[in-house]
Amino acid sequence: MCGIIGYIGDRKACDVIVSGLKRLEYRGYDSVGVVTENGGELYIRKGAGKIGELEKKLGLSELPGNRGIGHTRWATHGIPDDTNAHPHTDCTGEIALVHNGIIENYLELREELLEKGHLFRSDTDTEVIAHLIEEELKTAGDFEEALRNALNRLKGSFALGIIYSRDVEHLYFVRHESPLVLGIGEGEMFAASDVPAFLPYTNRAVFIDDGEYVILSKEGYTVKDFRTGAVREKEVHTINWSLEMAEKQGYPHFMLKEIHEEPKAVKEAIYGNIEFMDRIAEEIAEYDKIFIVAMGTSYHAGIVGKYLFQRLARKVPIVEEASEFRYEAEGVIDKNTLVIAITQSGETADTLAAIRLAKKRGAKTLSIVNVVGSMATRISDLVIYTHAGPEIGVAATKTYTTQLTVLTMLAIALARHLKTVDGDYLNTLEEDLHKLPELIEEVLGYEDELKALAEELEEKKDFFYIGRGISVATALEGALKLKEISYIHAEGLSAGELKHGPLALIEDGVPVVAVAPSGKTFDKIVSNIEEAKARKGFIISLGDNDELRKISDVFLRMPEVDELLSPVVYVVPLQLLAYHLAVLRGNDPDKPRNLAKSVTVE
Ligand code: F6R
């Protein structure tokens, strides 16, 4: 997730762009860049760091001209440094562009363009687009045709802002699976990833749809379909949001916005890793002594990872909290050990210490990380990015489902490599993996029901979340979400454990949330639910088998999904339930008391 802002009009473009970038910073903040045009010449300044630090240092507010584009980056391909910061240019330096999204086929395109003699300066997927347009310009009738030809060769997600020094009347913008909105002024026009970027100047907006590009001039805009070239009529909306509401795209909290971003985030996690997973699997296939280390929500992803590795790759990783591993594991790690660290921030002190210990003992380290360029990525041998985009809410939501997504991809790739399970089953699982964004979308539709349920449960003091097999992790994560933002006591546990102690706490009306997808242990969890019901527990069950309806006070009918993929879908209603309970109880879910987004101390 990155932020784009473009301006064309009579104002000093860099002023509009710099102020817009400040308002887009929540979308990404590891590097910044601005390009303006004056007298047919492009002026580019860019660098790693935050806009506040770089504005003066790079002289961003001194750039001449009345049209230009800015970018605030959240790195996906290539570490956050000066060279990888956007804008990127073609070989001639006449085309400069900024990008938000991931180009899935960039390696293939880069190879082709290198062969044709193009010189690349960065490690980004974005740079290929500039060279591709340059290449298409050699045969196309004009810039617009070259742009369209290039766009039709791209796979993945992209919102683009493009400036061509030979066309001083226009700016070009594109949207495909990454957001883009136009701001309509009087004799001036804006384009941005999000409304807050231009809200101080205009509240009239046109939302661009997937597969469309925009030719922007001072006086107006033309929107066309980039597959057919046909002009599209667009509706102008009046935005009544405050600036703060607009940053959250109308959602009252970042957490809710981030939950609603999960379909997209999971898609990006798939797109962003599809090309690399086999190579990573090959590199780790020989290891049999495997530890998965992480904290909090990432630790729960590790538990899901354990089940996936067992069932698919026939490997049995030990999942350990990094805070324990770092003090206990020294004697058992050696060069034959693989340590997989899972960390959204890449900066959690205990997880970093665990990686360092593993390295010191000669083990191979693989980190699954969201923040590109974070410490974990710098000290690990191998890195898989989750591509969830920045997560502002303290409670992990979209970063969890993307961690699960990449762990599933890794386990499938390992199983293929090791031929541990039937290839047809892996194909089906892979097909189903691509359907996850749709399934998440479907369960997001339960929000009203979950909100009503939260109202019913608002006064409850203790919650129990139960699951079996891979769903134990979902139970633990559901309980953690509730604790951390609603401040209600909650326990997550394996349903089989219930009658070994915790059942003593179940009495009239105590909520028991059962995570019960169809699968190996479905009948077992049904018995466990009965046990809780017999003690008058208030049963809320999530599953795809209607039998659950009979034994539950509340039944949430979940879409059918392979048990191994179910954690990605089943956790979403639990995130929503926790969110609505927190709000009802007057808490700020984005900033829970006593907690920080990144725990950089032991
Ligand atoms: C809970 C949560 C935390 C983090 C934990 C690890 O919602 O966000 O439990 O999961 O602090 O953080 P990372 O993944 O950054 O290492």
Image (cartoon, grey):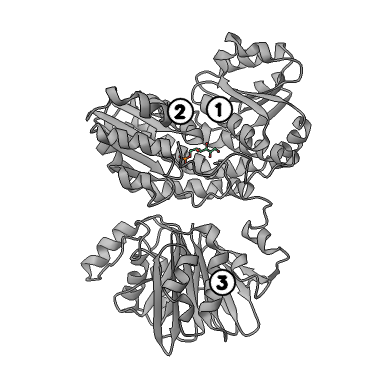
Q: Which mark is residue 74?
A: none
Q: Residue at x 31, y 60 (%)?
A: 123
Task: Kindly identify the amino acid type of the residue bearing the numbered disc 1.
Answer: Leu
* For marks 2 and 3 on the same chain, the one whose residue lies earlier in the sequence: 3
**Between marks 1 and 3 in the image, the one whose residue lies nearer the viewer:** 3
Q: Which mark is residue 19?
A: 3
Visible residue check, residue 416: no
* For marks 1 and 2 on the same chain, the one whose residue lies earlier in the sequence: 2
* Residue 152, quarter of the rendered image: bottom left
Q: Which mark is residue 476?
A: 1
Q: Is residue 193 above or below residue 450?
A: below
Visible residue check, residue 101: yes
Q: Nearer the viewer, residue 535 or 28?
A: 28
* Residue 482, quarter of the rendered image: top right
User: How far across and how far down the image is residue 62, in percent?
Assistant: 46, 81
Q: Which mark is residue 303?
A: 2
Q: Nearer the viewer, residue 381 or 543?
A: 381
* For marks 1 and 3 on the same chain, the one whose residue lies earlier in the sequence: 3
The residue at label 3 has a CB less than 8 Å from ligand 1: no
Q: Is residue 100 above or below residue 429?
A: below
Q: Mark 1 near mark 2, Cβ–Cβ under 8 Å?
A: yes
User: How far across and how far down the image is residue 496, in percent?
Assistant: 55, 14
Q: Residue at x 55, y 66 (%)?
A: 22
Q: Nearer the viewer, residue 592 or 270?
A: 592
User: How far across and how far down the image is residue 285, in percent?
Assistant: 27, 32
Is 461 situated left or right of 521 in this image?
right
**Mark 1 Cα shell of 10 Å, populated few (<14), some (14-19), many (≥20):** many
Q: Is residue 248 above or below residue 205?
A: above
| Count of numbered labels shown in the rendering | 3
> What secondary structure is marked by label 1?
helix
**Mark 3 Cα shell of 10 Å, populated few (<14), some (14-19), many (≥20):** some
The residue at label 2 has a CB less than 8 Å from ligand 1: no
